[in-house]
């Protein structure tokens, strides 16, 4: 179990580090957020299977994470259509 916990922490922190250092492109930010959510999903799956609980909460978490991904992609498409790129520093949010 400890090896899986190390793997889970490595997954989460690598997603967090990529989120912190790749802040110029919106697509890279969304991919690192999805990787962090995937590691949280894996951790909850391991915890629920270890304790012998039902997986109903995982379905709710999966639905909410997919909704978050769809909203992020919608914002990305809106940015690319209106500004032409996905650089976060190339435009101002203060119009």
Image (spheres, rainbow, N blue to C red):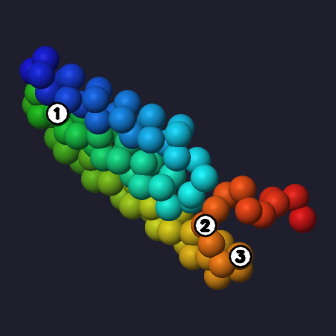
Residue 65: image location, x then y, percent = 40, 54
| Picture coordinates of residue 14, whole percent (x, y) | 36, 35
- Using the image, tell me which numbered label, if any, was put on residue 74: none
Furthest residue in direction bottom, as rendered: 81
Looking at the rendered structure, which numbered label has been put on residue 46? 1
Q: CA distance from mark 2 to mark 1?
A: 36 Å
Residue visible at 19% across and 44% down in the picture: 55
Q: Quadrant of residue 50?
A: top left
- Of residue 77 and residue 44, the one placed in the foreground of this image is 77
Circle number at residue 83? 3
Q: How many marks?
A: 3
Q: CA distance from mark 2 to mark 3?
A: 8 Å
| Residue corresponding to mark 2 | 86
* Residue in front for this viewpoint, 94 or 63: 94
Closer to viewer: mark 1 or mark 3: 3
Q: Secondary structure at mark 1?
A: helix
């Amino acid at each position: 179990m400890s090896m899986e916990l190390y793997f889970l922490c490595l997954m989460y922190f690598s997603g967090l580090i990529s989120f912190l250092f790749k802040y110029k492109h919106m697509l890279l930010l969304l991919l690192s957020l999805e990787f962090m959510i995937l590691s949280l999903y894996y951790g909850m799956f391991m915890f629920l299977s270890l304790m012998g609980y039902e997986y109903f909460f995982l379905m709710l978490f999966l639905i909410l994470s997919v909704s978050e991904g769809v909203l992020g992609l919608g914002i990305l498409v809106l940015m690319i259509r209106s500004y032409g790129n996905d650089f976060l520093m190339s435009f101002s949010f203060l119009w």
